Image (cartoon, rainbow, N blue to C red):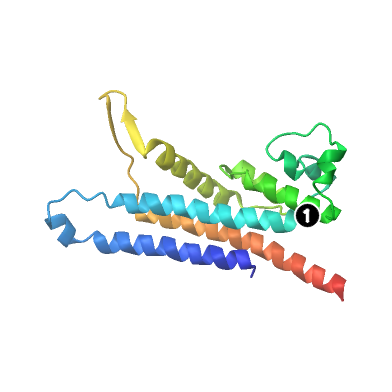
Amino acid sequence: MSKHKLVFDDNIKRIDSLCRLYKDLKTDKYKASGENFYLTDILRAATVLLHAAFEEYFRKTLIDWLPKKADEEDLKKIPISLYAGKKAEKLYLNDLAKYRNKSIDDVINESIIEDTKLKSFGSQQVIIQECKRIGIEGLAGKTLSTINDAVQRRHKIVHEADMTKDEEKGSTTNTGIQLSTVEKWKSAYQKLVDFIEENIETWEKEDATTDC
């Protein structure tokens, strides 16, 4: 198990905690109080945290493995770190001077870190593409489709406060969300991370064999 998977698992515990809190608060005591508690906002927070947990895991995994797995075409798309976020057409000697006493591997690693920091993984297509860059193929379509639903909902929560507009009535309401849906999304993310981890374990065994 990679160190990034351990962090991911810890973050999943935080999501489990939010889900348990939602269950505990959704009791007759709170219903009987007559107050209007927006308990489903706990589930919305869990949805946002869930994707953040995956992005944190995936970004660090890419940083670890892109230097070893990316082919020439992929490396061509990554600008040298001092040009992070834009394309560098030319390098001058003063640019290279900033890398004095650093190896080529150091420059590659720094550039990958800077480039990957700027990425977000907001669709199943992007996730598939980034996995391919490190040699991971055969992602389960159903799992990614479920994750895509979670990503779209996370976007709606973050950028639209999870509101749905009724064009006929001219009003807006909260978009409904259920605990079972959040748990389904969580399971899909866990399956994807487990699949990535299986590949990492294979690579680590291959590296260990090569070193012997």
**Residue 61, image x, y percentages:** 66, 58
**Residue 18, image x, y percentages:** 37, 60
Instruction: Give the vertical position of 209 relative to 70 (above or below).
Output: below
**Residue 70, image x, y percentages:** 79, 50
Say which amino acid is labelled 1: Pro
Q: Nearer the viewer, residue 57 or 96?
A: 96
| x 71%, y 54%: residue | 136
Q: Quadrant of the N terminus?
A: bottom right
Residue found at the far bottom of this picture: 212
Horizontally, residue 72 falls left or right of residue 125, namely right
| x 80%, y 45%: residue | 75
Horizontally, residue 133 falls left or right of residue 179, namely right
Q: Nearer the viewer, residue 135 or 3?
A: 3
Q: Quadrant of the C terminus?
A: bottom right
Q: Toward which corner of the image does residue 125 lie, by quadrant?
A: top right
| x 12%, y 56%: residue | 33
Q: Secondary structure at mark 1?
A: helix
Horizontally, residue 150 falls left or right of residue 66, namely left
**Residue 187, image x, y percentages:** 49, 59
* Residue indicated by mark 1: 67
